[in-house]
C-alpha cells in the first residue's frame, strides 16, 4: 500500500517536473520570438514623406507601442497622437542615445536628411545633417547600443558619367550634387562600419517616390506627386522638368514594403552593405501626363524647366536592380498605369 502510494507520488512529481520544463522552454521560446519579431523601433525623421508612411506600416506589423516616431518638428497632430512620439534632433547624439536607452530600442530607421533640391541651396548644412546623423547612429550600433540600422541612399549617388540606361549595381559613381556626394559617402561609411565593426546596416537606393497621402520634401522628382494634385485641382500643370526627362520612380507602397522586407531578411542574405539598387518603373513628364489624360481627358501640361533640370540630367534613366531581386527577393507591384489609377482614386476621395 505504502509502496504503491510512493510510486504514485513519484509519478506525480515526475509529471509536474515535465510540465515545469515544458513551461520554461515555452517561456524562452516566446521571449526569443518576441525579441526577433518585436524589437523596439525608433524612426528618426518620421514626419516626412517616407517616415509618415513607414511609421504606419511598422506599427501595423510590430504593434503601435513598439514603434517610436521622432522628428525635429511635431508633425500633424493626428500623426503625433497616433503612437509614441519624441522630438529628436538627428544632430544631437545624446538625445538619440537617451531615447534609445530609455526605451530599449534595437532597430533605428534614419530618415532625416536634406533632399536634393533643398541641399543645393544650403550645401554646408546638407553635408552636416546627412553625414553626422548617420555617424551618430553608426556609432551607437558600433557601441552595441542598437542592433540594426536602416538608412536610405538614393539614385543621386550616380552622376553624369554613369551609364544612364539600366544603371548597374556597380558602376562609375561621380555624383555632381551635394546630396549625391553625401549619399555616396554615407554608403562607403555604411559598408566600412559593417566590415570593420560588424554593424548590421541595410540600405536601398530609392528612386523618386510617389505617394498620395504625404507631400514630398524638396526633391528633384517632386513633380511626379505635384502633377496629380494639380490635375485634380486645376486640370493643368506646369512642370519644372522638360517633357523628355526620364527618371526611375516608385510608388510609395512598393518602397515601404521594400524597406520592411530588407530589414526582415536574414542577415546572410544582405550581401551588399553599401546600398541596393531598387527599381519599379521609369517615365518622362510627357508619359505621366498621358497616363493622367486617360483618366482626366481635359488635363493639360506645359514645361518650364528650372535649376532642377540640371540635377535630373545627371541621374540615371532606369535602374538594374537584379541584386536586390536575387539576394532578398525584391519584387515591385506598381507600374505607371496602376499607380496613376490608385493616386487619382485616393486623391479624389481626399478632396470629396
Ligand atoms: P522629407 O524631407 O519628406 O522628410 C525628412 C524628415 O526629416 C522631415 O520630417 C524633417 O522634419 C526631418 N528632419 C530634418 N532635419 C532633422 C533633424 N535635424 N532631426 C530630426 N529630423 C529632421 O524626406 P523623405 O522624402 O521622407 O526622405 C527620407 C529619406 O529617404 C532621406 O534620407 C532621403 O534622402 C531618402 N530618399 C527619399 C527619396 C524620395 O523620393 N522621397 C528618394 C531617395 C532617397
Image: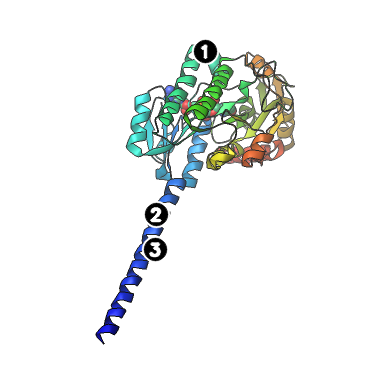
Q: Quadrant of the C terminus?
A: top right
Q: CA distance from mark 3 to mark 1?
A: 60 Å
Considering only order in the chain, which callout, 3 or 2, is on the residue closer to the N terminus? 3
Q: Which residue is mark 3?
A: 22
Is residue 151 among what the camera can see?
yes
The answer to whether 232 is drawn above or below residue 62 in the figure is above
Q: Residues within 10 Å of mark 3 (few under 14, many from 20)?
A: few
- Nearest the viewer among 47 and 342 is 47
Q: Position of residue 177 (x, y in %)?
A: 59, 15
Q: Which residue is mark 1?
A: 123
Q: Are marks 2 and 1 in contact (CB under 8 Å)?
A: no
Q: Quadrant of the N terminus?
A: bottom left
Disc ID at residue 28: 2
- The mark closer to the camera, 2 or 1, is 2
Residue at 29 percent across and 84 percent down: it is: 4
Q: Position of residue 290 (x, y in %)?
A: 75, 31
Considering only order in the chain, which callout, 1 or 3, is on the residue closer to the N terminus? 3
Amino acid at each position: 500500500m505504502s509502496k504503491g502510494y510512493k510510486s504514485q507520488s513519484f509519478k506525480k512529481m515526475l509529471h509536474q517536473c515535465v510540465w515545469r520544463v515544458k513551461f520554461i522552454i515555452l517561456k524562452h521560446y516566446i521571449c526569443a520570438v518576441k525579441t526577433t519579431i518585436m524589437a523596439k523601433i525608433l524612426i528618426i525623421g518620421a514626419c516626412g514623406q517616407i517616415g509618415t508612411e513607414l511609421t504606419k506600416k511598422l506599427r501595423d506589423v510590430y504593434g503601435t507601442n513598439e514603434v517610436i516616431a521622432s522628428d525635429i518638428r511635431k508633425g500633424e497632430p493626428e500623426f503625433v497622437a497616433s503612437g509614441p512620439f519624441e522630438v529628436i534632433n538627428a544632430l544631437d547624439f545624446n538625445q538619440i542615445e537617451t531615447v534609445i536607452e530609455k526605451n530599449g530600442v534595437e532597430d533605428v530607421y534614419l530618415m532625416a536628411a536634406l533632399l536634393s533640391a533643398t541641399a543645393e541651396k544650403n550645401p554646408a548644412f546638407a553635408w552636416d545633417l546627412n553625414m553626422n546623423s548617420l555617424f551618430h547612429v553608426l556609432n551607437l550600433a558600433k557601441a552595441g547600443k542598437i542592433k540594426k540600422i536602416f538608412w536610405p541612399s538614393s539614385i543621386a549617388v550616380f552622376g553624369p558619367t554613369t551609364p544612364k540606361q539600366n544603371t548597374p549595381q556597380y558602376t562609375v559613381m561621380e555624383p555632381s550634387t551635394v546630396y549625391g556626394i553625401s549619399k555616396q559617402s554615407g554608403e562607403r561609411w555604411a559598408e566600412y562600419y559593417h566590415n570593420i565593426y560588424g554593424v548590421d546596416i541595410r540600405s536601398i537606393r530609392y528612386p523618386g517616390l510617389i505617394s498620395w497621402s504625404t507631400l514630398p520634401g524638396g526633391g528633384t522628382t517632386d513633380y511626379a506627386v505635384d502633377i496629380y494634385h494639380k490635375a485634380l485641382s486645376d486640370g493643368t500643370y506646369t512642370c519644372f522638368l522638360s517633357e523628355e526627362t526620364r527618371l526611375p520612380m516608385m510608388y510609395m507602397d512598393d518602397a515601404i514594403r521594400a524597406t520592411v522586407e530588407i530589414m526582415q531578411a536574414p542577415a546572410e542574405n544582405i550581401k551588399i552593405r553599401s546600398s541596393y539598387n531598387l527599381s519599379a518603373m521609369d517615365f518622362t513628364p510627357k508619359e505621366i501626363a498621358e497616363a493622367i489624360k486617360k483618366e482626366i481627358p481635359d488635363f493639360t501640361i506645359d514645361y518650364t524647366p528650372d535649376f532642377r533640370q540640371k540635377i535630373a540630367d545627371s541621374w540615371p534613366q532606369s535602374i538594374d536592380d537584379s541584386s536586390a531581386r536575387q539576394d532578398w527577393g525584391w519584387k515591385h507591384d506598381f507600374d505607371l498605369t496602376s499607380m496613376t489609377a490608385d493616386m487619382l482614386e485616393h486623391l479624389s476621395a481626399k478632396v470629396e
